[in-house]
Amino acid sequence: MGRANCANLRVFLRLFSSAQMGRKKKPAQRKETKRDDVATKVGQMKLTGDDPESETEDRVVEDEEEEEKLEDESVESSSKEKDTKTSEENEEPDDVQAASAAPVAAATASAPPQLSRKELKKQKKQAKRAQLMMEMEEESKGLGQYTVAQQSRAADSLLYEQSRDIKIEKFSLSARGKELFVNATLAVTYGRRYGLVGPNGMGKTTLLRHMAERKLSIPANIDVLYCEQEVQADDTSAIQTVLNANLKQIRLQDEVKRLEEELDKGSDAASDRLQEVYDELEAMGADSAEARARRILAGLGFTADMQDRPTKHLSGGWRMRVSLARALFMEPTLLLLDEPTNHLDLNAVIWLDNYLQSWKKTLLVVSHNQDFLNNVCTDVVHLDDKKLYYYRGNYDSFKKMYQQKQKEMTKAWEKQKKSLNSLKTGGMSSQQAKAKVVKDASRPKKGARGRREEEESEEKPELLKRPREYTVKFSFPSPPNLNPPILGLYDVTFGYPGNDPLFEKLNFGIDMTSRIAVVGPNGVGKSTFLNLLSGKLEPVEGEMRKNHRLRIGVYNQHSADQLTMDESPVEYLQRTFDLDYQNSRKLLGRYGLQSHAHTIRMRDLSGGQKARVVFAELACRKPDVLIMDEPTNNLDIESIDALADAMNEFTGGVILVSHDSRLIRETECQLWVVEDRSINEVDGDFDDYRKEILDALGEQLAQGH
């Protein structure tokens, strides 16, 4: 934006200010106080990302008090410019002052017509939008996707930078104008293992990323590692990729080679330094580094051959496992994991669960796997209402304490409601009653503790809101009974072209009472087995037989790809199942799809939102048997609970592949393991299978079990 446009904008703001009748100019002293307040806010850390235009519309709708303050300062600065140029904030180029002086004088001479409140409000928005556009032009590509504000540290800054604990008070974080955290406190103690929980889309991943990028005040003494992206695909083997993560060890080993060469040439000066390097390598356990790296890779499912295979020959999922192995090998002071079990099979989850129970440093993990959170975490951090709340103990302990907290909040809200009704019955208006209740709530608390809480809190008292629980309800209609056998594989042999057979002479069958979980390491053919059962794949030999009345409902990781991307969820259900508009929305809401997502195109939905549409579609198809491959991916904890309840209420057959041990336990599924080109029932329960897996890897069962 050019200088002339800047001048025109300022003229517009001054004309607009003059149009407001009855406004009094603030004294200069008060104006300076306001400037001090603004300067204090600017002193807070403000960090921006990469998308300059995404927040324009959201920033337009700020509160009216801030708009009025901007307008007041604009008018006052105009008058002050005529008297003095001592303040840098009020200096303007001569041509801008000349351009603004005449219009202001003209406006004073002839008062503009009085505007209605609606017109004034419209002008405010127009002025604000114009100002924001100007700021974005002038601020070197403007604001980005995220904005962070946090308190600056002064007195204890040196001590804090040397700490291994994290304490960030009253920080706020927004994304594209949407507030994710408001005056929240992040408190992480060294050596604790935290599980970060809360509904999807509330900012858990955003918080981890901001911590990893140090956009929040993480002490310099803490090395942070956020496991997010798969490793690069190149000629480096998986094991070497993990070892190369320790840059200091690699540097020292290179130095050893150089010093040994110098020693061979007769250089005595290299001898002393060589011994020092040997000592450093011994202190960091360099001799056992490869064995430790191979142990981690083996636990995550890598065979000896795969460990030595170049990463360019590994799929994206396996390269993600290499990335996780590298993070575990590095043992950072603070390890951040975001849904680490999503890329793993059940066997690898069992190993990771057991391994992290012995983690000595600080861990912050986001996961939808309740068993994993119960076994690994010493604390739970709950993201709720844009703040972080801390609970000692595992996830089950958190659930009990949170339910009790909800009861207390509901009781307090009901007491408030009773007080409001009583005041209104006594003759007060609704607004008067609310003001009275808020005033009573703001009275000073008795005792030193109450005074301290008031001093620490900067939030104004307000009416309590009715506690709302996040609930999801899945259901599958119970089918009519079918006589067995309803579905089976008979003498089936199958293999993909150019590869060895995955199954030979396989025999397997289910009925309406079956509850089966198929387990086994990646690559043995679990998904292939489900595709043979559903009829998606044809056997090379043998056959699949099913009852002619049988309806099979299939859910897998690619089900969302079958949705019509240019339709909204409501349109899709209306067209596919002839549902009316209202019932379509009611069904989608029951499966946890937010109301705003009902009418936007499918291509614009997240993976989790599409998954809910697929489950709603699955229920509409009224299946007799459910075949599900990793159904918990993209679902949050509450939705997984709802899925388990729906499966337990369903009277048809169920067969699934899942890495979520709690879903397997809750639905009382019998374990069948794919091995030796066949499938066999596991002798024992899930705990027996867990112990068998860890014994095969040479691992000790963690004390928590």
Image: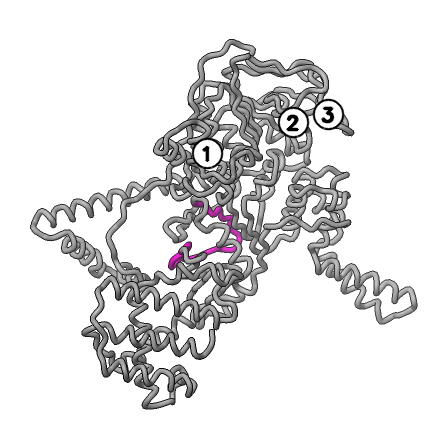
Left-right relation of 78 to 703: left
Camera-nearest residue between 528 and 56: 56
Check residue 440 for magenta coloring.
no
Left-right relation of 624 to 432: right
From the image, tell me which residue sits under label 1: 572
* Labelled disc at residue 495: 3
- Colouring rule applied to residues: one colour
From the image, tell me which residue sits under label 2: 528
Check residue 182 for magenta coloring.
yes
Disc 2 secondary structure class:
helix
Main SS of the magenta part reads strand
Disc 3 secondary structure class:
loop
Looking at the image, the residue that sits furthest to the top is 483
* Labelled disc at residue 202: none
Camera-nearest residue between 1 and 621: 1
Left-right relation of 676 to 229: right
- Do the numbered discs 1 and 3 sit on residues whose CB atoms are within 8 Å? no
Camera-nearest residue between 683 and 650: 650
Closer to the chain start, of discs 3 and 2, is: 3
- Do the numbered discs 3 and 2 sit on residues whose CB atoms are within 8 Å? no
Q: How would you rate the neighbour count of disc 3 (Cα within 10 Å): few for under 14, some for 14-19, many for 20 or more?
A: some
The segment highlighted magenta reads 179-198
- Give the amino acid at mark 3: Gly
Q: Is residue 474 above or below residue 599?
A: above
* Residue 437 locus on image (x, y percent): 18, 54
Left-right relation of 381 to 111: right
Q: Quadrant of residue 275?
A: bottom right
- Give the amino acid at mark 2: Thr
Residue at 42%, 66% (x, y): give it. 151
- Give the amino acid at mark 1: Tyr
